[in-house]
Image: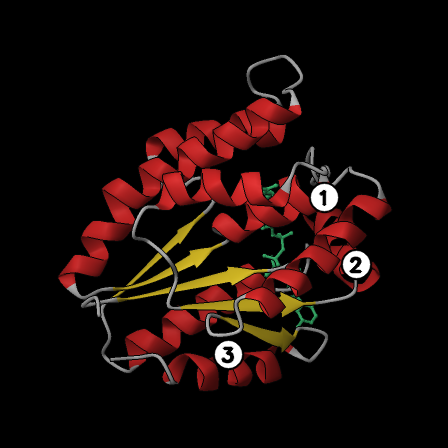
Amino acid sequence: MRAGRFITFEGPEGGGKTTQAKRLIARLREAGRDVLYTREPGGTPTGEAIRDILQHNKAGEPICDEAEVFLFAASRAQLVRTVILPALARGTIVVCDRFADSTTAYQGYGRGFPVEQMLAINAFAVGEAVPDITLLLDVPIAIGFERIHARQQELFQDADRIEREARAFHDRVRAGYLELAQRWPERFRRVDATQAPDDVERAVWELVSGVLP
Ligand code: Z5A
């Protein structure tokens, strides 16, 4: 068993992953734990540059679907080797906002690339960094999008490239996540993310408490 613990948040848009990751971090710190928050795509200078290309067409040209898969994988490989594995070896609890399951859900189930191929690419990118627990914040797409649109209006933000995908794409992503949760029940925990933030936080805390050293 590794010294630290690796916790990932996954799910469709607007499930509250970032909100809950930050609340979990606060609780863990209050409990005196050494914790690190990171996110995907991003979390390293290379990863953040890739994030700009992926989300805002920073390279100035449309990204083809195949290149998108490898850009997510490249961001992940760098994050794993330079941040996640060293932190886990030091005994740190790493909380990651999206990870490899996002590629299986979005590029596999969403875009329609063979799921087993996405799993093979993920395995190469992550090496030993398999999460100890994956919290699937599950929310119906309509509710998640309402939340995201409300936030965008409040902050005068535009939808990013993947948010602009058709509703059917996001429905496939959500269904894909639920399939992944059934395939790896020992790692995945589904959380009903339609609940109020405090209730989701309590559910997350209970689940995470079960895997802490
Ligand atoms: N992507 C991919 O395709 N392949 C990959 O391998 C990876 C990613 C790693 C990353 O976007 C995009 O990249 C994402 C998947 C794709 N696609 N899209 N679109 P991102 O990192 O910018 O965004 P996100 O990960 O999708 O997060 P999000 O959409 O911003 O949602 P969230 O983190 O789940 O939610 P939040 O930011 O915590 O909350 C959203 C709003 O809802 C906010 O105003 C909250 O105050 C509110 N909220 C949160 N919880 C609640 C509850 N319980 N009730 C009511 N309101 C709530």
Identity, as a three-letter code, of the amino acid under mark 3 = Val
The image quadrant that residue 110 belongs to is top right
Q: Where 124 sits versus 11, above or below? A: above
Q: Position of residue 101 (x, y in %)?
A: 53, 52
Q: Do labels 1 and 2 touch, CB within 8 Å?
A: no
Q: Which mark is residue 204?
A: 3
Which residue appears farthest toward the top when viewing the image?
60
Q: Position of residue 68 (x, y in %)?
A: 58, 28
Task: Specify which label sits upstream in the sequence, 3 or 1.
Answer: 1
Ligand 1 is in which quadrant of the figure?
bottom right
Q: Looking at the figure, which quarter contains the C terminus?
A: bottom left
Residue denoted by label 1: 110
Residue denoted by label 2: 141
The residue sitting at 45% across, 43% down in the picture is 122
**Residue count near mark 3 (Cα–Cα under 10 Å), binned few <14, some 14–19, many ≥20:** many
Q: Position of residue 111 (x, y in %)?
A: 71, 37
